[in-house]
């Protein structure tokens, strides 16, 4: 079995971090999780017991500067983990979860362990929204996938989340600098950062995020909820196959090592087989 670590960086984000620790800890073991807290003013929550944690000086004063510095920092930490003997390093934001299709009957480390990865591997990204009028506000102590059933297929969350050797991630884990990407069949990245309208509104009031210029970004991301609520949901298996082919073959003109999808807005309904994953 390959030795796999997962790392992330957070600031004022215990809601998602709790789920991140619970999910990746269950898959990989808490002793293989590395959480970095952006700012010496941060409190390390009790639910991180058994996880490697570290407070660092706050990185950057605006969204762009922060994200660039954050990924430089995390790329360096990943290189240290490889030097310590890890075979693979997973890097995600705290609201992102790599999931192997339950139909395979494999855990995440079992799935990744059978892949031949030269540089990195990407999962197909799905950005979850809230079907207004059908889905209620998120309840923290219930599985997310029992409460949310619709997501947009897109390129933004098809990320180079898994490294097989020390390499520099681009901003947001969206790519590995100077390297192509490979989208693994049956591997998905579920993004839950903007899957609840009330939670988005609450995040507007976080002074540290407003300071860094996140207000416009968060308002922009609420469009996933609008799309999920307005567009017809398509068949998951059929359209994930099509999206994987499309994103593998197409590249935007400004970045050859990022996926493209012709601007298509495709909403899918998540099959019930996923509902107990997280």
Image (cartoon, grey):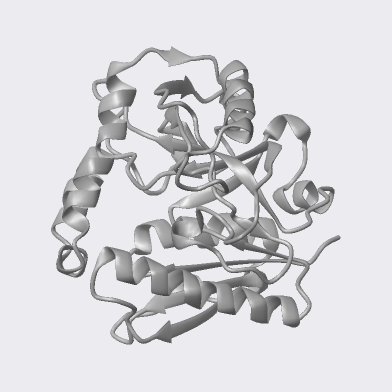
What residue is drawn where x is 58% and y is 27%? Answer: 246
Residue 137's image quarter? top left
- Residue 273, image x, y percentages: 62, 27
Q: Is residue 126 visible?
A: yes
What residue is drawn where x is 59% and y is 53%? Answer: 160
- Residue 18, image x, y percentages: 44, 61
**Closest to the observer: 250 or 16?**
250
Q: Quadrant of the C terminus?
A: top right
Q: Is residue 50 visible?
A: no
Residue 206's image quarter? bottom left
Q: Residue furthest front?
A: 253
Residue 208's image quarter? bottom left
Query: Please, is residue 249 above or below residue 77 in the view?
Result: above
What residue is drawn where x is 50% and y is 42%? Answer: 190
Q: Quadrant of the N terminus?
A: bottom right
**Closest to the observer: 135 or 74?**
74
- Residue 153, image x, y percentages: 47, 30
């Amino acid at each position: 079995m390959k030795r796999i670590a997962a790392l992330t960086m957070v600031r004022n984000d215990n809601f998602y971090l709790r789920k991140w620790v619970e999910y990746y800890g269950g898959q990989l073991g808490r002793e293989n999780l590395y959480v970095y807290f952006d700012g010496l003013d941060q409190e390390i929550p009790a639910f991180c017991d058994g996880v490697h944690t570290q407070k660092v000086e706050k990185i950057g004063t605006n969204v762009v500067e922060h994200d660039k510095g954050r990924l430089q920092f995390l790329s360096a930490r990943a290189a240290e983990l490889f030097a310590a003997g890890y075979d693979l390093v997973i890097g995600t934001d705290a609201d992102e979860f790599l999931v192997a299709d339950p139909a395979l009957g494999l855990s995440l480390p079992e799935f990744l362990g059978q892949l031949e990865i030269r540089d990195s591997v990407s999962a197909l990204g799905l950005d979850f929204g809230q079907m207004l009028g059908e889905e209620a506000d998120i309840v923290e102590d219930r599985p997310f996938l029992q409460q949310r059933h619709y997501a947009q297929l897109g390129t933004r969350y098809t990320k180079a989340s898994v490294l097989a050797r020390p390499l520099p991630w681009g901003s947001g884990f969206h790519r590995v600098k100077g390297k192509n990407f490979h989208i693994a069949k049956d591997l998905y990245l579920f993004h839950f950062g903007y899957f609840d309208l009330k939670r988005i509104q609450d995040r507007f009031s976080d002074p540290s995020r407003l300071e860094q210029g996140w207000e416009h970004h968060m308002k922009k991301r609420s469009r996933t909820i609008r799309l999920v609520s307005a567009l017809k949901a398509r068949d998951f298996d059929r359209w994930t196959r099509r999206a994987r082919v499309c994103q593998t073959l197409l590249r935007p003109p400004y970045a050859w090592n990022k996926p493209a999808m012709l601007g298509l807005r495709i909403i899918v309904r998540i099959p019930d087989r996923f509902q107990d994953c997280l």
